[in-house]
Amino acid sequence: MSLLRLKALYQTVILENAQAPHHFGTLPNAKTVTLHNPTCGDEINVQMLIKDDVIDQIMFTGSGCTISQASASIMTDVLKGQTVTEAQKRLTDFSDLITGDSLNDADQHALGDAAVLATVAEFPTRIKCATLAWHAADQLLTMGDDADDKTK
């Protein structure tokens, strides 16, 4: 794929997810983490319901830049339906990708549309924007069943 086509795909995926985010809203009785990016003012609230070790539902609310909102939308698509172990692998893969590390084809494919966010690695100041929701999801997965709500 040419560089111009790749950039066009990146822009389309980012804009579509920012303008019409997937899984945007709240879940009653869900574990919750809210994170802030003081650098640009992004705020993300991620909620998750896990049933039988599978992410049954995941939603987010928040405000911020296009990249943070699009990344949160894409993250919900990637993680929904994954086992906790699979989700933690996706979180690690995304972290590696966004910081400029290369992934094998299978791991990149498993990230779906999140793979287009790899270009954010070229803009270090935007990495926090792209990873905010993913950090919140990681915190939710590591909270354990005994914690009902956590806000930072």
Image: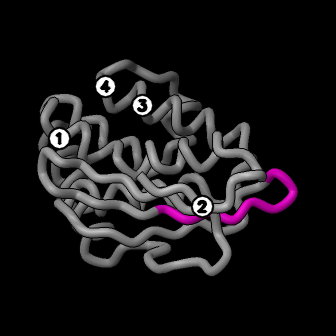
C-alpha span from label 3 to label 2 = 24 Å
Badge 2 is on which residue? 149
Tell me the residue that label 3 is attached to: 95
Q: At label 4, which amino acid type do we have?
A: Thr
Label 3 to label 4: alpha-carbon separation: 6 Å
Q: Mark 4: give few (<14), some (14-19) or many (20+) Cα within 10 Å.
A: some
Which segment did they paint magenta? 46-53
Image quadrant holding the N terminus, namely top left
Q: N-terminal of the two: label 1 or label 4?
A: 4
Where residue 2 sits: x, y (%)? Answer: 19, 38
Query: Disc 3 vs disc 2: Cβ atoms closer than 8 Å?
Result: no
Q: Is residue 68 magenta?
A: no
Task: Check disc 3 and give the amino acid type.
Answer: Ser
Q: Give the SS element for disc 3.
A: helix
Residue 131 to residue 11: above or below: above
Task: Looking at the image, tell me whether mark 1 or mark 2 is earlier in sequence order.
Answer: 1
Indicate whether residue 52 is drawn in magenta.
Answer: yes
Q: Residue at x 25, y 68 (%)?
A: 63
- Mark 2 nearby-residue class (10 Å; few <14, some 14–19, many ≥20): some
121 lies left or right of 74: left
Query: Foreground: 145 or 61?
Result: 145
Most extreme residue toward the top, as rendered?
Answer: 101
- Label of residue 126 in the image: 1
